[in-house]
């Protein structure tokens, strides 16, 4: 059974761009082996991640991520069975807020800051749908 | 929670284009800070404004606007929870009736004059949808 | 409240093209002032007219038209509340059957002749939708 | 083609209950012969009538009613093609506001007074649906 | 493939109740053998018959009926593929207009007289649905 | 009332291309006068014809066609009320199976041979919709 | 135009049951004259009020209520055009949390305490629908 | 994954009621162990069986049944994923045509005889839905 | 935001009925304070729990439960935003498989044993909907 | 009746590309004669085949395929009545996983490997729809 899980968490302490690179690389290696795909968004110290793959695998990875001390306050925001993956080309794509996509973040945010914790499932789906439609906002590697 | 509120009001006394400029500038500064977006339409002495943002913020701003002596007879015409903003690129866009968009105003109006007080929620949504589709009718600054 | 009313009537005696021109011109002047829009179709001695605008205004005009001795056998064929006008660019457009649009008339007609009296509301809406989509069939002035 | 037409009008001068009786009786006799059914509601000096039957017949009767000097300000409020009659048992039923059905009138009215002129098609259908469901509010003869 | 065909025809010359009895009896015997079910309605000299069964069989019977000189002006009014029969208990039920079901006939008729030729498919289905819901109006044998 | 009737029949004896030409020409002349439009498909000795026009006219023509000894085993396969004609440009178009449209015939056929008798209403509508979308498969005159 | 507006506010200082009685009585008198109906819910120091009536009237009353110093932090939670009133029998009904309806409050609340400020429009509609279905929870007068 | 498979087959040689009893008993024992439920219908020498359970198990059993020489001409008629079982109380219920349910069989049959081979998926679902609604027609043991 | 989360887990070692009692009692005390409601089902050594309440609270509790060594192999099976709670009367109800509800378990299970790990979201919702409809299967305290 | 059947099976022993060529060629010859169309997908030792054509023919072929010792563990994964074929141009098309369409396989697969046995009907339909939309992935002959 193919599922999609979306959660948010807060950076537990200041992580440099090097640390993000490491998380991303490690995730990409693991996910490729596990047949997991998805995207990771980092904005204002909040992670927003979408994971898709086999129900058991996604659960196992999510539970592993929960133990990771590099972030805290994890909260599942959306979860659903899907017929097809949205991110089949991304073992873990990176979405970061730039001047180019500032409006995209505001469009789905109730505040001036992008705060996934205040977003409902429909808004989150709208956000990721638009990301996928504009793949240029998705990068395979952080700079 | 992201909401959209539309209200109409009447100019309380003759406002010059300088006054409108002031309202607009002040609104744009405030709204940007508050994460509020929207549009303001002025035609035949009637304001029609759409405000979108966090439910609490939109309420707070609307209640502040209600106190403003520069207009009167305020009336909420539409209100709804939204999944995404329509005006994410406009902290407060200005729509004015020109020869160019005269037909647009007539299309949603029951009279020869554009009278928002006589319009229902569906008609208002149709009007703003078409405005957004023709962004050239939306300006950031009054001339 | 914005409404749309469609009725048919029969020419009461032979009207020349000059008479039609007069009806049209007079209608256009009145309707512009009243915020009424629509189209008038004349084929095989039968008028088919669609009027849109404020509910009270449309009723007032329709009742005035009913008294006009230049036609007879009036019958309302369709009426509905609308969210937006279809003919916002036409105070009263003229549609006449030419070789060019012969097929259009046959498409919505059950007989070889175009007979609005035998048409239901859905068929009439299909007919006017197609007219609006092919505006070249709508003229502002008769030749 | 079976249609339903609803219109409102104002009593042109004070009509006594005897006059209403006459209108009703005459209507019932005519309508039975014409295969027309419906209901007539009188409240605060406003008539609200629903007529159903063959499209041509309903139009002919409505046009006759328009000429009747006992009322004025006629306005079509709703019109639609129907598959079956709602009032098949009433050549012309009478609905009057009593203490018993006061709440029914308020339920569909925006003001404390029942004012059909301010009601849309959906509200009117809701009103008549509820009347038909509570047939005791429909009487064949005025007292 | 299970289908339902509805047609109307006019009595070609005065048929007595004995003749109707014969048509009915003969039909019932034939239909039972053919796995055909349905109902026959006779009112104001017009037959309205609904036939259901295998597509080929219904076609064969309808074509046989077309040749029958006891009626004329046959016209198919409705035809559709069905998932289940409506008249599975009636090889050919008889529906006649009585004082008891007068309102039923008026409900689906645009005129004071029941005229199937002026009825559309939806109205006819409404009529037969209500007949089936009130089986007492369906009789197996004419008196 | 505008309807569409589809039936199949078998060629009763070998008809040459000259005979088909005659049927087609005669049909086109008659149909144009009657306001009837449609298409005739001939494949593997089976006719599949779709007729559209006024309900009474289509019935009258179908009953006339039933008597024609040039075919046999007629069977109505589909019938419905329509809002607009599909074949308004064809008094009677001809569709023949060629190498070019072989796949089209197979697409809607359960067997290697095109057998309308085994096709349901939805499949037939799919077939004719695709024919209309590819008008080049419709010819006005047989070669 | 008939609308329904729902807002929440906080008691500005401790109000005794006598004060609530006064608000309710005054509201009932005013609303009856204005053709306004609705309900007022008080729980844990938070008011939740639903007002229904003519769009202009509801706006006027809401703006008057906003000025009332007996409460603060007003926030519109829901607003919509309606076809019929839900509270036509209540000029202003009172809903208070008792042991009897404790579960009802929890059912629509995300916390153990009933906090309208955290509720969306759909949840609020669910709450009021269930209140209306159990009219015994609605009282005309506070004890 | 829970699925439902429906197939028909013909008795390969005359089976007595004792044989049917054996098939049924054996099926019930096997199915209970396999978590399979369903019903078996026997009429005019044709079996119609519905099997529900895990997708793999239903496939395995169906393939075993295919080998059984007691019947022939097997044909899958319907298959779908289901959310819940319809026959959860029947490891294998028996449905036989009696005078009592004769009409039920005719209702879903195009011929006078019940022939599942000519039935589509929707008709079969209608048939089994009605069987389940009238459990008395389902028996655990043949007499 | 009100959400509902459903997960399954396996008993990590043999738990006696006393242990279950403890888990239940402790959960009920905690959940009542947290405004959390739900149900716990234990069958064949597998827990199936549904938790409903505020999104943050449900996440916090679920993450606490994940750490509990009394079970293992946790897997989220369903998660959704809800408008109203289903279990508002149960701080944590207990559902156990008895002879009485054996069929209920089989109805939603693909195997003879009830295995939530193989069930999709729709099937799980069907199961809990039926449990709620038959509250007698829900107990507040284990025996 | 036109149907579509999808099943999976496992290669029973190592088959070379020559063997696949033989299966394909033989299938194409048979299917063309039988009016059967479809596609065969081979990936990681698992066959996934979709067959479409007349219900009886598809059943007959499927039952023949079941006997073929070149594969094992057959399981029907999807089956439905269709209005038109999807593969009308392919008597049996071949789909193989290449670098070019790797992402396509992952998109519908829950694991890194493409495993049809774990896929539901909706996912399978999504997969084949996308294959048909990108016909270049379908080949008539294996290399
Ligand atoms: C925000 C965030 C996102 C992560 N995403 C993933 C992921 O998608 N896949 C993954 O395997 N690990 C991910 N990790 C890392 C896991 O927490 C954990 O360190 C890693 O899975 C351990 O991998 P290992 O089992 O190879 O040691 C993520 C960590 C963080 C902080
Ligand atoms: C028609 C109209 C529209 C307005 N729109 C806004 C607005 O969108 N945002 C805003 O902050 N103020 C708006 N204002 C101004 C407010 O009424 C008020 O003057 C302003 O919010 C006060 O700002 P301050 O809190 O910075 O003093 C508007 C005023 C008028 C007359
Ligand atoms: C077929 C037909 C269509 C007409 N349409 C309109 C119309 O759209 N608007 C209008 O004002 N008058 C229309 N008229 C003319 C009216 O019947 C009437 O003559 C006119 O409204 C009187 O205008 P006045 O009030 O300016 O004298 C129409 C007349 C005919 C015969
Ligand atoms: C409010 C009102 C409602 C009426 N309703 C009907 C009606 O339903 N049917 C009818 O024939 N006449 C109705 N009439 C009367 C007609 O206006 C007209 O007087 C009558 O049809 C003339 O009938 P006659 O043709 O038999 O002289 C109504 C009149 C009024 C004022
Ligand atoms: C109004 C009407 C309805 C009829 N309905 C049926 C019918 O449902 N079934 C039938 O077999 N014959 C019906 N018939 C009789 C046929 O026209 C024809 O006489 C009869 O089928 C011949 O039967 P036979 O083939 O046994 O000689 C009907 C005739 C009329 C006039
Ligand atoms: C397969 C087939 C299709 C026909 N289609 C039509 C048709 O569409 N219109 C038509 O008038 N006649 C059609 N005919 C011819 C009629 O059967 C009949 O010969 C013709 O209508 C007689 O015309 P008339 O009334 O002018 O003598 C068709 C005949 C066949 C065999
Ligand atoms: C929570 C609350 C609810 C109220 N509801 C209403 C109401 O429904 N109608 C109303 O007229 N006044 C209501 N009031 C009172 C108004 O704020 C105001 O005092 C009143 O309308 C003044 O009435 P007056 O215009 O008759 O002086 C409410 C006040 C509070 C604090
Ligand atoms: C019409 C028919 C229906 C059957 N249904 C079932 C069934 O539902 N379950 C089953 O296990 N066997 C069923 N069987 C019997 C199987 O064909 C086969 O004999 C049986 O499964 C062998 O059981 P075994 O594996 O215990 O020897 C059926 C046989 C026939 C002829
Ligand atoms: C199957 C299972 C279900 C549980 N459900 C709940 C629950 O609904 N709420 C809860 O607070 N604890 C639940 N617990 C217990 C938690 O794992 C944990 O022991 C408890 O929340 C700790 O409570 P404390 O924070 O009061 O020490 C459950 C434990 C198990 C094994
Ligand atoms: C994976 C697979 C797919 C097959 N597909 C088909 C097919 O689509 N059509 C077909 O006729 N045979 C197909 N076959 C071959 C049949 O199993 C069988 O060998 C063949 O139909 C026998 O043909 P014959 O009846 O001409 O001897 C397939 C075999 C395998 C292993």
Image (tube, coloured by chain):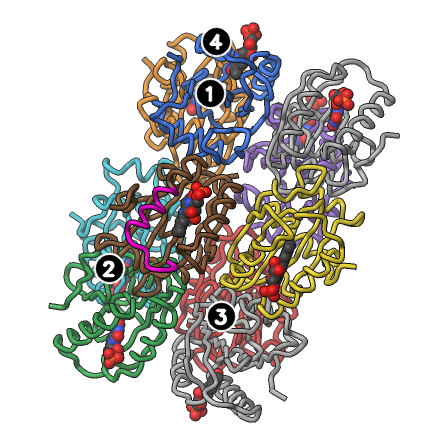
Chain colours: A green, B cyan, C orange, D purple, F blue, G red, H yellow, J brown
For label 2, the residue is A89
Report the disc number at residue F19: 4
| Residue C64 located within the stretch drawn in magenta | no
Viewer-closest of H34 and B92: H34
Image side of residue H107 versus residue F129, left or right: right
Return the disc, 1 or 4, that comes first in the chain's sequence: 4
Q: Are marks 1 and 3 on the same chain?
A: no
Mark 1–mark 3 distance (CA, rounded to whole Å): 72 Å
Q: What is the span of residues highlighted in magenta in the rendered image?
A: J11-27
At mark 4, the secondary structure is helix
For label 3, the residue is G48
Query: What residue is rendered at 56% in x and 59% in y?
Result: H64
Using the rendered image of the protein, determine whether residue J50 is visible from the camera's viewpoint: no
> Does the numbered disc 2 mark a residue whose Cβ is under 8 Å from ligand 1?
no
Kindly report the secondary structure that dominates the magenta region of the rendered protein.
helix
Report the disc number at residue F59: none
Q: Nearer the viewer, mark 2 or mark 3?
A: 2
Mark 2, chain letter? A
Image side of residue G124 versus residue D112, left or right: left
Q: Are marks 1 and 4 on the same chain?
A: yes
Mark 4–mark 3 distance (CA, rounded to whole Å): 82 Å
**Is residue J33 shown above or below B71?**
above
Do tag 4 and tag 3 residues touch (Cβ < 8 Å)?
no
For label 1, the residue is F42
């Amino acid at each position: 059974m193919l599922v999609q899980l979306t959660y948010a968490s807060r950076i537990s302490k200041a992580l440099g761009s090097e640390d993000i690179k490491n998380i991303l690389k490690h995730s990409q290696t693991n996910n490729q082996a596990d047949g997991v795909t998805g995207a990771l968004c980092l904005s204002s110290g909040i992670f927003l991640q979408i994971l898709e793959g086999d129900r058991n695998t996604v659960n196992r990875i999510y539970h592993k991520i929960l133990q990771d001390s590099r972030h805290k306050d994890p909260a599942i925001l959306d979860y659903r069975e899907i017929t097809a993956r949205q991110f089949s080309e991304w073992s873990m794509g990176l979405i970061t807020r730039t001047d180019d996509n500032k409006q995209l973040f505001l469009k789905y945010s109730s505040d001036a800051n992008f705060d996934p914790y205040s977003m409902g499932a429909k808004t989150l789906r709208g956000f990721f749908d638009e990301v996928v439609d504009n793949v240029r906002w998705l990068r395979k590697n952080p700079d």
